[in-house]
Every structure is written in C-alpha cells, then in structure tokens.
Image (cartoon, coloured by chain):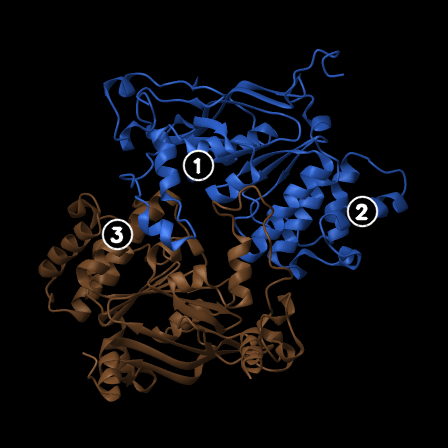
Chain colours: A blue, B brown
C-alpha cells in the first residue's frame, strides 16, 4: 500500500535538522545558539527510538522542533513521506503528539480531566455529539488505567504517576501514529516509573504507535527502545540498535556515558571501572571547532579540531561520528 | 582475640560507632493534622563508613537527615527517640552546643546546588564564613588561603579566580563541588549528603560520587548518603537502610539488601527498576500509589500495596527481626516463615 503511493518505509524521516536560537550579546548584536546542528534519523512505524544525552545537548529541542513548537532554522522533516511545513502542520498534529516531562506543569489546573483529554478531540473535531465525546474520553481513561469516576476531578487531585497517565491519554486522544515522549518518567518515583514504562510498552503493542523517547536515564531508555541515538552538543554522535549500543559502544562519549551509569548491583559496581570525563559540557554559544566532543575526549587529535566528523556506518546500521574510533 | 568478654566487645563496638539513632520520631504539625514523617527509625553509623538511606519521596529519608542536624522546618519537631553522637544525646544539646556541632562535627550537602548557595555573595565569602566561624582560620587572608586549598581538593579549576565569582557563574557540577568544599571546611566526622547528585547529569554525577569516595578515604569521615537511586547506593555504600512511610523496612549490608532482600517493598523495588538482566522482560511494578502520611494505615505502612499482605499486616506494625544472614527486616511474612519453621521442627 505504502509502495503504491511512493511512500518510504519510514514513518519519520529527519534530514539535517537545524535549530538555532538568537541570543543577544550586546546592543544590536545577536549570535546563534546552535541547539540542534544537523541531526538526521529515521523511525519506522511502531518503533521506539531512544534519544539520550546530557542536559543542554538539544534532545528536547529536537522533539519540540519536530512538532513545530519551534520553527526550524534548516533541514527537513518528512512524516509518512510528506514534507512537514508550517502550512500542513495543524492537520498533521492529529498524527503526532507529545507527552511532556513534568506532569505537574503540563496539565491546566483549571480544567477537569475530562476537558484536558477532550481538548484535542475538540480541536480536531473528532466527535459528532456530546455522548460520543464522553464515550471516547472514558475509553481513553480506561486505556491508561484511570477510573471513570476521575473524569470530573482536577489535575491537582492526582499523584504524579496518575497525572502522567492523564498526559498520555491526552496524547492518545487523536489516535496518533507518532508520540514524542520528552522525559516522561524522570519526574516520577522509582516504584511508579515501572508502571508508566510498562504502559508505554503495552500501548505500543496495542496501538502500534512509534515513539521518540527522550530521556537521560540510560537504563530506562535501553529497556524501552529498539534503537538508541546519543546526542552531544546538538549533534548525534552514535546511533545503533539498543543492545548493540550497550554491548559494543564505539564513540568515546557513549563509552563514558555508559560507564557513568550507576548499576543497581553492588558486585558489578565494585568491579566496574568508570571512565570519568574531565570538566563540563562547553557552552553551546562557544562551540569548540571541529568535533564538539574533542575538549573532553582523550583520543582527540589535530584532525578533530579542524574537521567535524559525520556519521558513518560501522556495519549493521551502527552509525558513529568519530575520526579515531 | 576470642577471649574478649561480652562487655569488652560491646564497649569496642560502641567506640567504633559515631552516630546511633534510636527509635527516632519526627512529626510535622500542620493545619490538617499531625504528619508522622519519621515513625521509629533506628540505625547505627560506624566510623568512616558510608550508610545509604533509600526510599521514595515522602518516605522520611530527608527528614531523618534534617532531624540529626536539627534543621527542621518550623512546624516540625523531634517528638521521641535519641540521637547519640559519641554517646551524647544531640536532643539534649543547648542551642549553643548545637551551633558548634553543626558544621564542625557534622555537615550537610543539599540536593539542589542551584538554590543552596546564596546568590548575592561570592563563593569565597560563603566558604570563608564557615571557616571563620568554626576553625582557627580567623583572619580573612588565612581563611581565603584555606578556601583556595579546599576548592583545589574538590577539583575546581583556577580556584584563585573562582572564589571571587558568584554562584551563577558556576555550572551545576561546580556548585556542588563548592557545596562539598564548604561541608568539608571543618573536617567533620559525619557528612550528610541529601540527594547530592539528583540534579546533575550522569557524567557529572560520576565525577561527584568518585570525589566523595576519595575524600572519604582521605579524611576518614562517615557519610550518610540519602538518595532514591538504587544505582548510586549500590556503587557507594557499605550499609543500607530502606525506608517506607517513615519506618525502616530493612537494614543490612549492600550485598544483603541487593542479593537477599527480605522485605516485600525492597523486593518490589528491585524488580521494578530496569537492569542488565531484565532488558527483554516486562518490568514488575509495585502496584498502587505512594501512601499519604496524613492517612497512615494502622499496621504495616506498605500493606495497601503489598501483594502478599495478610490479616495481621493490617492490624499491627511488624517487629524488626534478624534474618539468618544477620541483617534486619520488618515484615510479618518473615515472622510467619520462622513460626512455620519452628512448628515443622517440632
């Protein structure tokens, strides 16, 4: 079917996406903050791509730019083969949704749960009468494990985990094919995290949605993702299958990131050698020349300072951007 | 060595203890009633040991730490129990004695390095304050000199320049280093770290944890590490206490807790986190929602969420019981198991 329409096998195709924010540095002077600087990736229908990196590396900006919450500076984004532009984004948002990080600030405190979940239905006019709207909302609430009697309550009456469920129900209301999940579990307690992670996985099995799962917790990302992309200062430095990336990381940044994750297992923790990175992430306003990671990389050579490496395939779709590895 | 009498052994054990918390109760008196945030917590901290306190939000782990330092909010009060520092009860200390204890013998690092430094003073000024209050570095020059040494010790680059800067000019990791330098200024016996790395990125977290471990070895202080991250606990701690609903569920060495958990909550917690072994499987979450401290169940705090809850769990608080391998857990299931074992022997 998709071949007939000359559509590609990918649901999401991002090519050289760029998002620069102007920053005022003085009177009449602005310089660009390169939050996302040439990011390319693809996601198949029903697949989960994990996006990891430290704070300030641009992972949230990628998610927001895809949904055109920001107008990208450059690059293109094809959804289901169709080029996304300012003109066609509104109807396309029916197929793309977002779940936000903070369930405490992403729900309107003056709206009832019914209205929060019903709002996307109103916007896209997805019902013919009130009874149908109500029925759809109750179905969505059941899908995410909320009781029907919660419909008339306000967001503040719920715990963090339940609020995140409301946020997910709202994203599912329009029956999307693709959801950007921006750190959806990092604000939750450990015992609640597992409930929400399981729900994401179950919903994917049931509804076949694709996720862009943005998080900084590598264990969580590994658990939920089919593939993982690692970002550093606005660029993807490595992208591979989740297991492949964990077992055979190639990029020095990925190596140190993985070794820095505290494993919940005392015996492994005692044995493991951490690769401690020196210093902090450089400011994106003063990006190093060439490879952005070279200032903290122990393999850095002269070539790294002169030229920025691009992603190259190291076999089986394992892409790495590094000169020396 | 086996000829030591029991009294001698106890005496030696007590000498090695630096802090002993016995049946601590801390409550907050709010408009909607008394909130028993800490409800009978006991533990011992040995000299130069790292003790991990783990639990979810609202389990009372931070309040336990604040009770030791006596820096509770106005509505909070320690209502029972003892906190023995080298055999003396901190709760009997006068305000003056407590001021001397705080910062000098015991200091604290807070979770959020962005808000726990004063934004209107330079980093150097804030470091000097602690030094001039508690140590012999009374003059400005001497204190500044010492501040630079301290910042060097915690791995801050160009400390001579840094001490003249304000907190906003430092990154999160740098601010947390400054906080650690401040806490170490008086070489305390006990360092309380309340979620010291929660606000930081993993690579910076690894730097800070490594630094804390090194300094602990170098200076020989004891650390109480309060966190919700089981990964951090596993890589850092000698002993662990697991808290839920203001009570201790289980306490023991890191290996006991991770490889032989004896409380249903600890078991559930370990099952619900993704790790290397369960990548391909579904996680097993703990059902239900965290408890409301205003509305505590009569019996075991965890019983509304426990899959194996029995009748007695609803009625009575489980006693702390020693497990065969020597660690302690408070769960009626263990009592039941032991009773069954006894009757089987008969």
In the displayed structure, B72 sits above or below B172; it is below
Element at label 3: helix
**Which labelled disc corresponds to residue B211?**
3
Q: Dot 3 falls on which chain?
A: B
For the residues beneath circles 3 and 2, the answer to whether they share a chain is no
Please state which of residues B280 and B91 is positioned toward the viewer in this rendering: B280
The residue singled out by tag 2 in the image is A139
Give the distance between the C-alpha atoms of the residues marked 1 and 3, in whole angstroms: 22 Å
**Which labelled disc corresponds to residue A200?**
none
Q: For residue A280, which quarter of the picture?
A: top left
Give the distance between the C-alpha atoms of the residues marked 3 and 2, in whole angstroms: 51 Å
User: Which circle's residue, 1 or 2, is located before the other in the chain?
Assistant: 1
Element at label 1: loop
Q: Dot 1 falls on which chain?
A: A
Q: Residue at x 62, y 49 (%)?
A: A196
* Residues tagged 3 and 2 counted as in contact (Cβ below 8 A): no
* Residue B197 image offset from top left, x and y in percent: 37, 53
Please state which of residues B116 and A159 is positioned toward the viewer in this rendering: A159
Please state which of residues A266 and B141 is positioned toward the viewer in this rendering: A266
Give the distance between the C-alpha atoms of the residues marked 1 and 2, in whole angstroms: 36 Å
In the displayed structure, B197 sits above or below B250; it is above
**Which labelled disc corresponds to residue A53?**
1
Compared across the picture, whether A318 is left or right of B298 comes to left
Q: Dot 2 falls on which chain?
A: A
In the displayed structure, B72 sits above or below A135; it is below
Q: Residues within 10 Å of mark 1 (few under 14, many from 20)?
A: many
* Residue B333 image offset from top left, x and y in percent: 57, 73
Element at label 2: helix
Quadrant containing the C terminus of chain B is bottom right
Compared across the picture, whether A145 is left or right of B67 comes to right
Q: Residues within 10 Å of mark 3 (few under 14, many from 20)?
A: some
């Amino acid at each position: 079917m998709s071949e007939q329409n000359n559509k590609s096998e990918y649901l999401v195709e991002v090519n050289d996406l760029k998002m620069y924010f102007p920053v005022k540095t003085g009177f009449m002077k602005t310089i660009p903050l390169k939050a996302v600087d040439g990011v390319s990736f693809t996601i198949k229908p029903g697949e989960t791509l994990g996006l990891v990196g430290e704070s300030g590396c641009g992972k949230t900006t990628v998610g927001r730019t895809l949904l055109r919450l920001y107008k990208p500076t450059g690059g293109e984004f094809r959804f289901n083969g169709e080029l996304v532009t300012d003109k066609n984004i509104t109807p396309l948002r029916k197929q793309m949704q977002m779940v936000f990080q903070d369930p405490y600030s992403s729900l309107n405190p003056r709206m009832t749960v019914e209205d929060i979940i019903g709002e996307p239905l109103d916007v896209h006019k997805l019902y013919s009468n009130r009874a149908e709207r109500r029925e759809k909302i109750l179905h969505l609430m059941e899908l995410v494990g909320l009781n029907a009697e919660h419909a008339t309550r306000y967001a503040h009456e719920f715990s963090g985990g339940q609020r995140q469920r409301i946020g997910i129900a709202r994203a599912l209301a329009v029956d999307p094919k693709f959801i950007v999940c921006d750190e959806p579990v990092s604000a939750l307690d450990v015992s609640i995290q597992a409930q929400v992670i399981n729900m994401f996985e179950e919903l994917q099995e049931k509804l076949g949605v694709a996720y862009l799962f943005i998080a900084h917790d590598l264990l969580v990302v590994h658990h939920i993702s089919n593939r993982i992309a690692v970002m550093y200062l606005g660029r993807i430095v490595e992208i591979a299958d989740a297991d492949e990336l964990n077992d055979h990381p190639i990029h020095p940044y990925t190596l140190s990131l993985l070794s820095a994750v505290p494993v919940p297992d005392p015996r492994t923790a005692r044995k493991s050698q951490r690769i401690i990175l020196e210093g902090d992430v450089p400011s994106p306003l003063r990006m190093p020349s060439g490879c952005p990671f070279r200032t903290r990389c122990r393999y850095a050579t002269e070539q790294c300072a002169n030229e920025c490496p691009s992603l190259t395939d190291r076999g089986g779709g394992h892409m790495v951007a590094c000169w020396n590895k | 060595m086996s000829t030591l009498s029991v009294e001698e052994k106890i005496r030696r054990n007590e000498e090695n203890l630096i802090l002993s918390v016995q049946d601590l109760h801390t409550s907050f008196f709010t408009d909607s009633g008394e909130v028993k945030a800490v409800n009978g917590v006991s533990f011992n901290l040995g000299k130069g040991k790292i003790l991990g306190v783990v639990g979810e939000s609202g389990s009372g782990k931070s309040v336990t730490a604040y009770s030791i330092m006596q820096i509770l909010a106005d509505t909070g009060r320690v209502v029972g129990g003892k906190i023995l520092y080298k055999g003396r009860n901190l709760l009997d200390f006068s305000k003056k004695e407590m001021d001397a204890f705080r910062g000098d013998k015991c200091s604290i690092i807070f979770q959020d390095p962005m808000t726990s430094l004063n934004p209107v003073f330079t980093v150097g000024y804030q470091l000097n304050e602690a030094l001039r209050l508690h140590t012999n570095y009374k003059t400005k020059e001497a204190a500044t000199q010492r501040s630079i040494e301290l910042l060097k010790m915690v791995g801050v680059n160009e400390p001579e320049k840094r001490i003249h800067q304000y907190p906003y000019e430092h990154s999160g990791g740098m601010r947390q280093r400054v906080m650690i330098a401040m806490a170490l200024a008086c070489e305390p016996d006990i360092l309380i770290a309340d979620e010291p790395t929660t606000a930081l990125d993993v690579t910076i977290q690894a730097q800070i944890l490594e630094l804390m471990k090194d300094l602990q070895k170098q200076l020989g202080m004891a650390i109480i590490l309060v966190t919700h991250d089981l990964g951090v606990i596993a890589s850092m701690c000698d002993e662990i206490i697991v808290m839920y609903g203001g009570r201790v569920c289980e306490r023991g060495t890191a290996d006991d807790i991770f490889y032989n958990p004896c409380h249903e909550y600890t078991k559930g917690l370990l099952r619900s986190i993704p790790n290397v072994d369960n990548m391909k499987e579904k996680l097993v979450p703990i059902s239900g929602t965290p408890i409301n401290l205003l509305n505590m169940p009569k019996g075991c705090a965890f019983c509304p969420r426990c899959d194996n809850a029995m009748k007695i769990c609803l009625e009575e608080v489980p006693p702390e019981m020693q497990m065969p391998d020597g660690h302690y857990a408070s769960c009626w299931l263990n009592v039941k198991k032991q009773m069954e074992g006894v009757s089987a022997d008969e």
